[in-house]
Image (cartoon, rainbow, N blue to C red):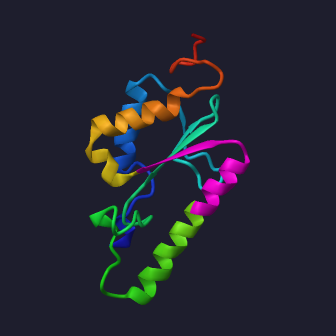
Amino acid sequence: MMAAVRSKDTKPEMFVRRLVHAMGYRYRLHRPDLPGKPDLVFSRSRRIIFIHGCFWHQHGKALCKDSGIPKTRQEYWIPKLDGNRKRDRRAVGLLKKQGWDVLVVWECETRNKSKLEKRVIKFLCKDPQGLSPAGVAS
């Protein structure tokens, strides 16, 4: 069963990639030289977007119904999912120290396209170099 779980090209990731691409932004995927291998990397503006699955990255019980811990084999799942969260925090912290701005998009947020689009635009448009989406000076 676990072999079927993908780490790249998931439905939420593809949704965000299509959304950002349609806005005119271009990006690199899963750069292995950066902490956490970010899903989308905008090198010129030093911005990164992570797309996290609510279960695998534990969005939070109060925030999301998809982030619960399984009732069976909790001795396996609790340390596993807690380790994922710690690794995520460590990666974001390292990226911020290196001067990157980081946005985390949760799987459940992809269900509301207009709200997510506004959030992504707000994050990407605060470009310190004054560049438009395609990288052309405005």
Position of residue 68 measured from the top left corner of the image (x, y, whole percent): 33, 73
Q: Is residue 49 left or right of residue 70?
A: right
Residue 83 falls in image quadrant:
bottom right
**Residue 110 lies in the magenta-colored region:** no
Q: Residue furthest front?
A: 62
**Which quadrant does the C terminus fall into?**
top right
As drawn, 113 above or below 52: above
Q: Residue at x 33, y 48 (%)?
A: 109
**Residue 75 visible in the picture:** yes
Q: Which residues are magenta?
A: 89-105
As drawn, 116 above or below 7: above
Count the marks. 0
As drawn, 97 above or below 28: below
Position of residue 137 measured from the top left corner of the image (x, y, whole percent): 60, 11
**Residue 99 lies in the magenta-colored region:** yes
Q: Residue at x 42, y 81 (%)?
A: 77
**Residue 26 visible in the picture:** no
**Which quadrant does the N terminus fall into?**
bottom left
Q: Residue at x 30, y 85 (%)?
A: 71
